[in-house]
Image: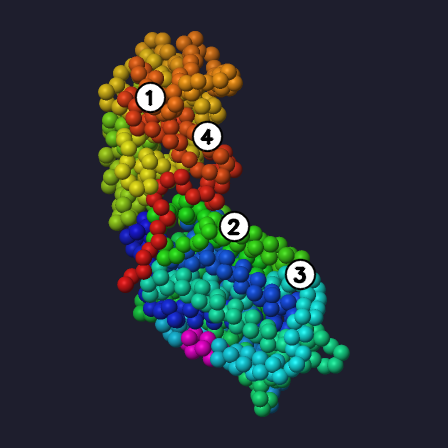
Amino acid sequence: MHNHEPRTHGSPAEQVTLSRSLSLFTITMIGVGAMIGAGIFVLTGIAAGVAGPALVLAFALNGLVALLTASAYAELGSAFPEAGGGYLWVKEGLGGGNGFLAGWMSWFAHAVAGSLYALAFGRFTVELMDMAGLPDFGLSIHMRTLLLMTLVIFAFTYINYRGASETGSVGNIITIVKIVILGLFIFFGILAMLRSDAWHERFTQEFLPNGFLGVLMAMGLTFIAFEGYEIIAQSGEEVVNPHRNVPRAIFYSILISVAIYILVSITAIGATIPPPGMKVWEYLAQKKEIAVVEVAQQTFPWGIGGIILLFSGLVSTMSALNATTYSSSRVSFAMGRVRNLPHFFAKIHPQRHTPHVAVLISGALMLLMAWSLPIEEVAAAADVMFLLLFLQVNVAVMTLRHKMPELERGWLIPWFPLIPILAILANAGLALFLFFYSPRAWITAIGWIVVGMLAYYIYFRNVEEKERPKEILLEEVVTLSTEYSVLVPVATVEQAHKLGRIGAMLAAANHGEVLALHVVHVPPQLTLGEGRVLLKEGRQYLNAVIEEAQKFNVPVHTLIRIGRKVHEAIRQTVAENASDFIVLGWPGYTNTAGRIFGSVIDPLVDNPPADVAIVRYRRNGDDGPFRAIYVPVAGGPNSRRAVRLAVQLAQVSPDGPVQVTVVHVLPPHATDAQRVSAEKIFKEVTEGIQYPHLNTEFIYGEKIAETILHGATGYDLIVIGATEEPLFKNLLVGNIAETVAKEAQVTTIMVKRRSSRLHSVIRQTVLTPATGDPVTIRKPQT
């Protein structure tokens, strides 16, 4: 089970959750209903005018782009079955500011989409009323549209206020009716198409009248019709067996929707009879939002197609409005739960168990935008924000694979990380392309983002910090600040003495300080606040480090903090205190599958936030003096760092002159060229070091690790650098250093330099951890 802290409000132990009542069928229908909304009716004609017959290709490619990002939603939706969806994943994977921005954009985008669907409902209803000859009461078409839009938003706000089961039941009925009507449209359209001898020429002649640019433009225009699967993830907290059902519902809904889109576009292009001298796609473009209604009027028997398609448009806009109302309220509920919006957004109705305040405010936001904003431009901005949100989610799925491999996932992305990288490129490309289609959309999106980030950094970040349990339980600074800091995390008194000694020696050599840290590990059964009862045990560990530091007249900074994961607490301490070096203790080899040093050390050494030394101490000699230090080298920055560390320990040792011997392994019959290369390595690793008791020598043997161990006889300490890493490969310390540390009879220190910024980013996204718990997949319950 995963150990991430539950989101709470109120008392520390109180957790606000929603009831699980949505089945696989219901949640799939919610996704289909969100995707097959007003877009298929309003945008088909306009997109056909841009792409021509290649509209079919535009829909198919948009389906592929949707599947790429849907893979991330399927994996994370099964691992985090909570209200909030992409917002919470970005917050977990990329941090507070990115998380807030993801939620802010998602809330706005879904609310805008809901306003668009409500306005489309109003317009379709007015058209039907006029066809039926009903009185207009002296009101304009626009005013009647706004009034009907207001009524339908009130209706679906009330439905969502009542609860998810009512929401799902109404959504199921609406979506099924809509699929049936579109099925009839496709059936009668294909029959009409097959009665024409030349229907295929409409697809083979001028398939790309505006080139591939037209296809890209049509993809941008219709993208809003493809993000409905995100709503499935928003409802994860209310889905029955979410580990299994969320991924299945996401893919089922996309496959159903894309198949309908493609068949509708084939029918529209192939079955429509245009006026003489006009191409089909030009005629559809001329009809714009009622193009599909015109096709139905031509293909349905008895001339009832127009009325039926208008009715279907009403049904479609209602189902999409239902889904977006649901989703926008769940995002704002999740944001309120972690204080990224005012806390009343997180209130749960005592009888209906719904986020009623979030539902009501989201409905009000839809009304406000529909009445006061140019909805077409804001809808385009919603497209931009959906694309930026999806980009963030694909980055988050990669970072969470690295940060939380222990999470139980109901589904894993295949060909990782290729699929998320392709999704990032596709989403970024479409978002950038929308700038050329509608610069005002980008301006609107940027404006909303700027307002949100100002609100976050001025207010919500401070509120979020105040609500978060304090992680630092005790901090004592008994010295002036220094320019060099050695972090020594300790967990036992014995370890504190041993690591404290080495840390103090390094601090003395660099005229720095020791930062002694004890992390109180809080199990998932307790809240972080309840972990404070464990404070007492840490004082004795820090006192042991202070004793060792006093022997070298080194200032000490002590810190006790709490956390779910010890390695994350250490990493955070490094960042907050700008530590230059970390001294970690490795008491012995672990038998845990997938681990080398242990659950604390592995993640730190995999991607070091500072230069790091792993000390494998031996009881038979590590308390004695260091009179002879043995440093095997292979060249590179880690070997240089190992030699420098060994010399620094020797220089401050109170045990008299300490001999430092730097060795390099050569094969028994080494050539002159190999010896020359080895001399270059010696020169490289000792350059700039002035120490009179430093010498270099060759040692010979076939097996490097075995030769190093044999040559270490008579030495008090071994210092060895980690194997150098290629940019796109993860290693901890390498097999040779690991073997030496495991089998040596004296204390061994393995040294690894901090990751470069580029390598750190690649490690946290593209690369999988060098070791650690394998990414797990939850087995379906039987």
Q: Is residue 738 left or right of residue 134?
A: left
Residue on which the image places disc 1: 709
Magenta part of the protein: which range? 170-178
Q: How many marks?
A: 4
Which residue type does callout 3 highlight? Phe
- Tag 4 near tag 1, CB within 8 Å: no
Residue found 46% across the figure and 18% down from its top? 670
Distance from disc 3 to disc 1, alpha carbons, whole Å, reads 65 Å
Q: Position of residue 175 (x, y in %)?
A: 46, 75
Vertical arrangement, residue 630 with respect to residue 754, above or below: above
Query: Closer to the camera, 576 or 594?
Result: 594
- Residue 304 in sight in this render: yes
- Residue tagged 4: 724
Helix, strand or loop status at disc 4: loop
Task: Compute the Cα span from label 4 to label 1.
Answer: 20 Å
Q: Which residue does the image show at 58% across and 91% down from the upper left?
A: 302
Q: Kindly identify which residue carries mark 2.
A: 421
Residue topped by disc 3? 212
- Assign a secondary structure to mark 2: helix
Residue 499, labelled with which disc?
none
Q: Position of residue 736 (x, y in %)?
A: 38, 28
Between disc 2 and disc 3, whose residue precedes?
A: 3
Q: Which of the two residues, 393 or 663, is positioned nearer the viewer here? A: 663
User: Which sits earlier in the primary sequence, circle 1 or circle 2?
Assistant: 2
What is the C-alpha distance between the residues marked 1 and 2?
44 Å
